[in-house]
């Protein structure tokens, strides 16, 4: 898997946008960027993924730079329930479908304050 | 879609005992993964199945560990002669072998070996 780098932690105020950065400078042309989050005592929850274009769903937006070496996950209106560890992952083998296992790092701990 | 189901949620056992965990994936998901997560760390890959075939095993999966998926549906993970170092959260995930389809995780089984 391509190596990703995330800050250890960040916080934001409830109701404000949370912008979570991720560097993946060694990403290959056909590798996707995935974001998961893990709330205490629960399993990781899939949020969003993308290849080149920006993506948006009901949970978040994913902005990928043109050179694809970094991305930002945006939670547009953070709530207290968004407090969690967020993982940015670039797995190898997704395009071929040969092996889409994920390698988790330590992620970034987002704390949403009231 | 009832999600990935894991049973039991918690297991306390004495060192040396055998334990077995069950995972029921999302229906029609042909891939099933097992991960282990210790406190403060991200999940670590253990093994995965495509249908009933076990296609990859991590070196973390010692010979005391065995996983099966006999009919390509639910899976079991057995740990024989448990050790205190086996204490962890055991997570199961499933996915469709199709393009960039993401993994979906259950809420895990918390194992405590005393």
Image (spheres, coloured by chain):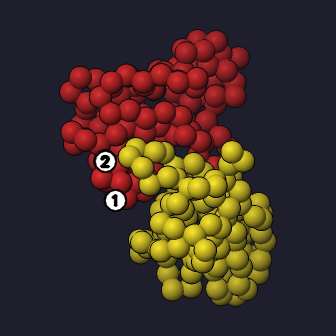
Chain colours: A red, B yellow
Image height of A35 relative to B63, above or below: above
Observer-nearest of B38 and A90: A90
Q: Which residue is mark 1?
A: A98
Q: Position of residue B45 (x, y in %)?
A: 47, 62
Secondary element at tag 1: loop
- Residue at 57% across, 19% down: A12
**Quarter the C terminus of chain A occupies:** top right
Q: Quadrant of residue A81?
A: top right
Residue at image position (47%, 74%) is: B54
**Marks 1/2: CA distance?**
8 Å
Q: Chain of mark 1?
A: A
Q: Residue A84 sits in which quadrant? A: top right
Do marks 1 and 2 share a chain?
Answer: yes
User: As displayed, is residue A35 above or below residue B111?
Assistant: above
* Residue A23 visible in the current orientation: yes
- Mark 1 Cα within 10 Å, few/some/many (few <14, many 20+)? few
x then y, percent, for residue A43: 63, 49
Is A101 situated left or right of B72 in this image?
left
Q: Residue at x 42, y 72 (%)?
A: B55
Q: Nearer the viewer, residue A57 or B111?
A: A57
């Amino acid at each position: 898997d391509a190596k990703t780098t995330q800050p250890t932690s960040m916080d934001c105020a409830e109701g404000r946008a949370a912008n979570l950065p991720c560097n993946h400078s060694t990403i290959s042309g056909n590798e996707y960027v995935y974001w998961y989050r893990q709330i205490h005592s629960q399993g990781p929850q899939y949020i969003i993924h993308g290849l080149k274009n920006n993506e948006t769903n009901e949970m978040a937006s994913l902005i990928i730079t043109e050179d694809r070496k970094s991305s930002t996950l945006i939670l547009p209106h953070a709530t207290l329930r968004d407090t969690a560890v967020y993982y940015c992952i670039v797995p190898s083998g997704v395009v071929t479908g040969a092996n889409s296992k994920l390698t988790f790092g330590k992620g970034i701990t987002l704390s949403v304050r009231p | 879609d009832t999600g990935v189901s894991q049973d039991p949620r918690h297991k306390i056992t004495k060192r040396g005992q055998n334990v077995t965990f069950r995972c029921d994936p999302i229906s029609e998901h042909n891939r099933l993964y097992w991960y282990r997560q210790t406190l403060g760390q991200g999940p670590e890959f253990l093994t995965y199945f495509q249908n009933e075939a076990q296609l990859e095993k991590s070196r973390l999966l010692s010979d005391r560990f065995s996983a099966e998926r006999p009919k390509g549906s639910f899976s079991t993970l057995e740990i024989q002669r448990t050790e205190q170092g086996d204490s962890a959260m055991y997570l199961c995930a499933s996915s469709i072998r199709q393009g960039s389809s993401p993994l979906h995780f259950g809420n895990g089984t918390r194992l405590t070996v005393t």
